[in-house]
Amino acid sequence: MSPLRITEIYASIQGEAAFSGFPCTFIRLTGCPLRCKWCDTVYGFEGGKDFSLDEVLAKVAEFGVHHVELTGGEPLAQAGAVPLMQTLVDRGYRVMIETGGSESIDRIPRDVHIIMDIKCPGSGMVEKNLWSNLDFLKPTDEIKFVLAHREDFEWALETTRKHKLSERCQVIFSCAFGLLQPKDLADWMVADKAPGRMQLQMHKYIWHPRAKGV
């Protein structure tokens, strides 16, 4: 297997989605084909360091944490992400992947928990959504909309209802940090009976919003 290009591997608290609050080891793979306007991990676009599969596994084992998440950048932009996930599953870890929704998820191992973005217009990347990915989601997986403004929320609601997303898997509505106030999103979700749940990025309230390695 070719080396994995990785920006950082660290242990922290899971700040988002179904496993929010659990200790988790994060493997941030370098590189991303998208350029979302609100991206908070621009530092992961380039650079990084090459790791063999064994080196990644050894680093994860050092932390001794049951939950492991692949993130980015866009982890699925590297072919080695799939065998890494399978190996982690085989070793008994609870594995998650956060993906931007522009790369096919069809090869992700069945036991991996998928958190997949659907890019709203405010991201500037709405045309990159790979809609065929919806067919590969499990009921336990999650779709996440990151919202920058009211227009994004209305688009996300329409998309959720059009594709019956809440019948496919869990749906998350998340504020783009610093762009959309949580109170506004909460008010909209109640008023419009949004078929999903609201999410805040816990880690950005615990540490500085631009802190790395948390």
Image: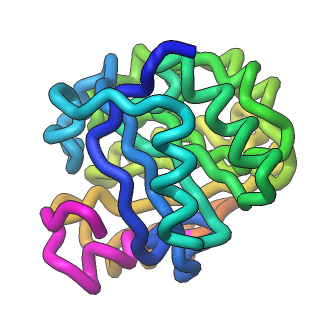
The magenta region covers 198-214
- Taking the image as shown, residue 148 lies to the left or right of residue 137, namely left
The answer to whether 161 is drawn above or below residue 12 in the figure is above
Does residue 156 appear anywhere in the picture?
A: no
Q: Give residue 6's position: percent from left, percent from top.
A: 34, 36
Does residue 103 appear anywhere in the picture?
A: yes
Q: Residue at the spot x=38%, y=78% of the render?
A: 202
189 or 214, nearer to the observer: 214
Name the quarter where the C terminus is drawn.
bottom left
209 or 154, nearer to the observer: 209
- Taking the image as shown, residue 33 lies to the left or right of residue 110, namely left
- Taking the image as shown, residue 99 lies to the left or right of residue 112, namely left
The answer to whether 98 is drawn above or below residue 133 in the figure is below
Q: Quadrant of residue 206?
A: bottom left
Name the quarter where the N terminus is drawn.
top right
The answer to whether 48 is drawn above or below residue 185 in the figure is above
Q: Give residue 130's position: percent from left, percent from top.
A: 57, 17
- Colour setup of the view: rainbow
Q: Any magenta on residue 199?
A: yes
151 or 27, nearer to the observer: 27
Q: Residue at the spot x=62%, y=34% of the render?
A: 84
Q: Give residue 48's position: percent from left, percent from top.
A: 22, 33
The total of numbered circles placed on residues is: 0
Q: Quadrant of residue 210?
A: bottom left
